[in-house]
Amino acid sequence: MANTQPAARPANPRFSSGPCAKIPGYDLNMLADAPLGRSHRAAVGKAKLARAIDQTREILGVPDDYRIGIVPASDTGAVEMAMWSLLGARPVEMLAWESFGAGWVTDVVKQLKLDAKVQTADYGQIVDLASVDFDRDVVFTWNGTTSGVRVPNGDAIPADRAGLTICDATSAAFAMDLPWDKLDVVTFSWQKVLGGEGGHGVLILSPRAVERLESYTPAWPLPKIFRMTKGGKLIEGIFRGETINTPSMLCVEDYLVALDWAESVGGLQGLIGRASANAQAVWDFCATRDWIENLAQDPATASTTSVCLKFTDPRIEDGAAFAKAVAKRLETEGAGLDIGAYRDAPAGLRIWCGSTVELADVQALLPWIEWAFHAELAAQTRS
């Protein structure tokens, strides 16, 4: 059977899982109001940072008594700030089902040297949340960016838990419902769901997390960029936009533009609907083909942002080489950029379906995946 190239390509072939696609219609002129060359401590800079915090709260539905801070070093910086500042007061339980969660395990066990209980799951699965002891401090990712799985809801987290829940929610925030009453620390970066520029993280603290910060001093020294208290009290300025280090006001403006766009498409529910529709298109495609399937084994935990796929055709001789070649074909044709699986994940494809991606582009990509699969299979047979 002839394998004809599709007639149409995605208008925007960018499906990278980070940095992610910019908002539809993005133009650099949208950043014209950025106060470049001005101090972030000037009134205009403080106002921009405060607006970023306020809009984040409004769109995500963050409770009024939770603090929101803009911090350095992207989501990684936010997670590290939380772990280095909060852990050690109680026993710790680490949950990992993908490479970034595994990285947090390494930091806690090997760097902080805490005797943590560690639960892991293979790529495409999550741990049994009912088995987790939430009287410990628990660290986990909400959405496995490299494994295509997510926590389905917060039902397993008890309201009367004694420990803190520290949730890396990058690639989930702005695309999935987060149960704020079950989460004490939430982190994310601008460069994921809203397609912001890299380098900045967001750290959200519940009153319970603030109480821990003010009542507990870690046994290890804290670098300056991790310090959130002074004299046993929270440095409130951090959570009013008085950042620990100098932020890029160009990146802040870019985030504000994305937040305005998020409001224009219906706020959080509109963003969730866009991501869910994109993911569903991929799932429907896989359901009608016997050579590709979702890496996520349980539909209830399948990610709607970082959708990870694996090839299942028994004729494939070298899965890693085959998947890499398919991704290369898609890139060469300008049909899909940066959709190879993460380097530590099982071989396959990873399609970012987050809220800034247009459904029409996902729908246009899928025939190209089918073409590339059959073209590579034919090339393998000839060789």
Image: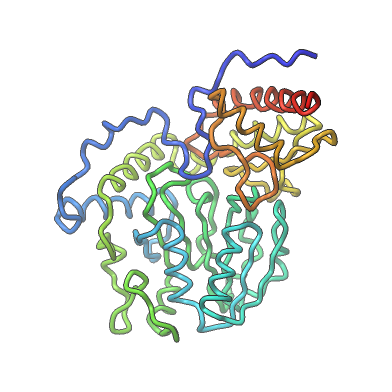
Q: Nearer the viewer, residue 106 or 177?
A: 106
Which image quarter: residue 315?
top right
Looking at the image, which residue is at 66% across and 31% down?
Answer: 326
| Res. 382 image quadrant | top right
Q: Is residue 312 above or below residue 223?
A: above
| In the image, residue 351 above or below residue 4 | below
Q: In the picture, which quadrant includes the C terminus?
A: top right
Question: In percent of the image, x 64 and y 48: which residue is there?
Answer: 148
In-front residue for pair 341/275? 341
- Is residue 276 found left or right of 189 in the rendered image? right
x, y percent for residue 212: 44, 79
- Judge whether 165 appears above or below 29 on screen: below
Q: Position of residue 222 (x, y in %)?
A: 38, 78
Across and down, in percent, residue 321 comes to 70, 39
Direction from residue 48 to residue 349 in the image, left or right: right
Give left or right: position of 340 versus 300.
Answer: left
